[in-house]
Image: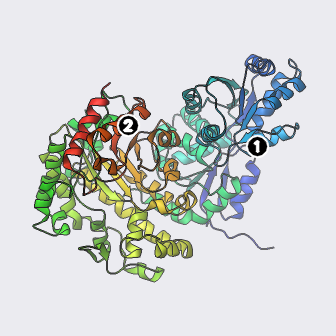
Amino acid sequence: MNKAPAHFEGLNIAALESRRADDMARMITRHGGIAHVSPSMREVPIDPNRAAIDFAYRVITGEVNVVVLMTGVGFRFLLKAIERHVDQQRFLDALSDITTICRGPKPAAAMRELGLTATYRVPEPNTWRELLQTIDANVSIANQVVGVQEYGVSNASLVAGLEARGATVETVRVYGWEFPESTDSLEENVRALANGKRDMLLVTSAHQVVNMLRMAEELNVVDDLRRGLHSTVIASIGPTTSEMLRECELHVDFEPSHPKMGHLVTEAARQSSELTKAKRRVKPIRWSEESKPQSDNMPPHPSDDSLFMKACRGEATERTPVWLMRQAGRYMAEYREVRAKQSFLELCANPKLCSEVMCTAVDRLGVDAAIIFSDLLPLLVPMGFDLEFVAGDGPVIHNPVRSGDDLSRVKALDQPEKLDFVYETVRQTRADLPESIPLIGFAGSPFTLASYAIEGGGSRQYTNTKKLMHSDAGAWADLMNKLSESITVYLNHQIAAGAQCVQLFDSWAGCLSPMDYSKFVLPWMKQIIAGIDPSVPVINFATGNPELLPLLRGDRRTVVGVDWRISLDVAWQRIGHDCAVQGNMDPSVLLADPDVIRETVDQLLQSVDGRPGHIFNLGHGVLKETPVENVIALVETVKELSQR
């Protein structure tokens, strides 16, 4: 009998699985890992459950219009809770007469066992966002009573989303989560994780996260656990579990292609070597005493209290902050005058001129934040690429990589000082700006930089990029690792030089499907965000495909940039209202008359409805044909109409 490949290669794999602990241990062992599986919880029915009984009567009497079933186990517990008090058949008949929505296959299967068919089933990955999208596409719940069978802790985001659509929400909790009857193995795993003795942690439910931290509190090792997990690969079964990990400020390193235990173990095993190496490299820069980031040895910068920084943190502001991508550019006469005297690369290499063009733009436009004047591609030069900006053609890389053999000449940013002119641009711009204006550093995201490096310039089809991505997984991972490490070092040096925020630009990510983005890009984006100095916000901006938005959330300090291809209220709903957003007016509106600009700004601000955490920006950079007067009018209009 053939054995499955031993991908884990003897790594110590922790898992918190309860119901299928034996299956999990066997799968880890079969894939070459040393299994440390500890049950972390048990479902405890609420008995007597007066709320469930009352809920059942309200369904029977027609007072509940829509029922959302979150779990199959929960539906069975609900029936058990009411069986001695309510005629079960009447309850089932009443359910069959109203709209029922199942969050995935398990509650739908539980309904089928009793001869019922769900009206709607939420597609994968079955999070509350897909649930709300299913409702938006199929059901009007305004002025309706929506009953939600909950499990464990209440999902505040789901309840808020239902209420925002005009529903009255009735939640019914049918069971709780407690520690297993014996906690010995859970205690052992928590202590081992705290001591850095596990290479990977597999998490298959949100409540395992809660109970792991509860156990750490009982053992008085919470801080040690968090430090230990910083160097332990955390593999989450899917978006719902990842969301809980992020809420608990734990970084998710890996999600499988499908939220199933088999996919989790098999795919984590396959990538375990790359994941563990990357996690152990999360110390991307050794700071000198004079260049430590703000979080280590400096008080907050005066701009920390600015409207922009508050919005990044999701805090309420007296008006909406506004800045614009490419706010210093060819549409401004002052920029064209400076640019006429040197090439673009020469300008980027001159910190004083870079500061001058940006500070001029900030002063003339009256925006609330500045971004350093630079470009995405100079980072590629010290990595071994021959870059030239050709008039009429834009950036050209004369030695692109097209195969695994070409990667031998690509190196990570092991000499970050070769980009000192960028760090000096940060220092110079920071010194020249008013202290109240925050400064944003930036870098290209690894997929966009990889596309330039492979295609040799811009592209419409990304044929060579996708060919390498799909045909040579090892070469793709090698290139993305080198780019990701370099981007992390590059951004941390910008922060050390004085940037209060950094933005990642993924200009070409829109050519990818969500599945390809999740597989070929997301693991490295997570690695980068985890490695960036935690004292600053990170804006993650990818253009071209609104379906990618939920994948851009990053960690709790991440702001999601939104382009103009989707209305901002719909985008924010997909991303989650617990996350700050930036965007997203179509830049072409600035070519229209001022009254059109004003109307568009008003509509966008109304769609936000005063929700904190919004930064007004365009859905891409200012177009070169834009009259500068229109840009000034835009900024003034945002300031006027967003006053609270």
Residue 106: image tag: 1
Residue 579 sits in quarter = top left
Which is nearer the N-term, disc 1 or disc 2?
Answer: 1
Q: Quadrant of the N terminus?
A: bottom right
- Relative to 592, residue 458 above or below: below
Q: Residue 368: x percent and y percent?
A: 24, 39
* Residue nearest the viewer, comparing 115 with 600: 600
329, above or below 105, in the image? below
Task: Give coordinates of residue 123: x percent, y percent.
Answer: 67, 47
Element class at badge 2 = strand
- Residue at mark 2: 614
Secondary structure category for the residue under label 1: helix
Of residues 333 and 33, the one nearer the viewer is 333
Q: Which mark is residue 381?
A: none
Pointers 1 and 2 in contact (C-beta within 8 Å): no
Q: Is residue 28 above or below residue 404?
A: above
* Residue 312 seen in render: no
